[in-house]
Image: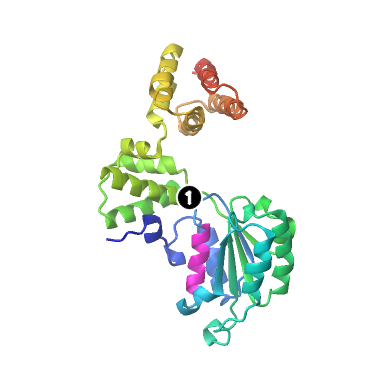
Amino acid sequence: MSSLPWIEKYRPKLLNEIVGNEQIINKLNKIKQLNGNLPNMILSGSPGIGKTTSIYCLLNELLPENIRKEAILELNASDDRGIDVIRSQIKSFCSKKLTFEDNKEFKGKHKIVILDEADSMTIGAQQALRRTMELYSNTTRFVFACNQSNKIIEPLQSRCAILKYLKLEDKDILKRLLVIMEKENVQYDESGLQALLFTCDGDMRQAVNNLQSCWLGFKFVNDSNIYKIVDSPHPLIIKKILGIKDLNKQLDILNLELFDKGFNAIDIITIFFRIIKSIDSINESVKLEMLKLVGFYHLRILQGCNSNLQMFGLISEINKLL
């Protein structure tokens, strides 16, 4: 029995195994046809949607296995984010001659520097990279993976092809989860699948980790177990609050089923936003007003106002619209 986390055990190895973001995967397939002549790239998007995985899949197809370890340098820029790293590790890697550079399999290809979470790099380190990228453009290519491409300085952006990844759709995540559950003989019901999709919010990594945690902890995947694992308010409680018009009953549910269970206001208001957005039975103009209220009270909570009081205020304002 493998001790690997499922997120590693079932990580795609080839581009055609990746689900979602089909347009970007098609672009990477076209890059593959250039026989290793990669551009410098910035991959931006939310966590857990396949940025780093897709570049490794591309490199798996471009570089023979026996030379990958020596030809790729990966750094997590949130840890190694200062200018010293540029001067030492990156420049050293770019300037060294590899043992297989004369190998026919490597001809026309480049060494690769992968900088994960590159938006955490200091401005000074990013400035230092500009010259490094130019000096070693004949031998080395850089790939930046980040959540927000606007935190990468303009001079670096102008040197790179920018690929913007979208959050994964539920159908794409479900497709992968069903494969994993079949291979691991996971017992589940439909409510468990829906809970996994709701709690991950387009993040494949979180969906797979929640699935494994639930299976190891409870040996059955259903909605109740999933919400225990993620320690998040159950959407049915929020729907119950929105389904009644008696303000006192709404506040009782908020107190007894949410606050008394230890959920904080940020957790609750986040679920409110997602539930209101997804309910089709509410008139669009009313829904818009509700979402404005959620946004307003969310800001008040983040500014440090009394959380419980702000949630009571939100419920009373929403009650007027029901």
Is residue 157 shown to the viewer in this render? no
Q: Position of residue 236 (x, y in %)?
A: 38, 29
Looking at the rendered structure, the secondary structure element under dot 1 is loop
Residue drawn 74% across and 67% down? 131
Magenta residues, start to end? 51-61
**Amino acid at circle 1:** Leu
Q: Position of residue 252 (x, y in %)?
A: 41, 16
Q: Position of residue 127 (x, y in %)?
A: 74, 60
Question: Can you say whether 178 is above or below 161 in the image?
Answer: above
Quadrant for residue 76, please give it.
Answer: bottom right
Is residue 24 shown to the viewer in this render? yes
Quadrant for residue 292, please give it.
Answer: top right
Residue drawn 30% across and 44% down? 217
Give the colour scheme of this rendering: rainbow
Depth order, front residue of 163/153: 153
Question: Can you say whether 199 is above or below 107 in the image?
Answer: above
How many numbered markers are drawn? 1
Residue drawn 64% across and 73% down? 92
Is 49 magenta? The answer is no
Quadrant assignment for the N terminus: bottom left
Question: Can you say whether 220 is above or below 296 in the image?
Answer: below
Q: Which residue is mark 1?
A: 168
Q: Position of residue 320 (x, y in %)?
A: 52, 15
Q: Main secondary structure of the magenta part?
A: helix
Neighbourhood count class around disc 1 (C-alpha, 10 Å): few under 14, some 14–19, many 20 upward: many
The answer to whether residue 14 is left or right of residue 101 is left
The answer to whether residue 115 is left or right of residue 1 is right
Is 53 magenta? The answer is yes
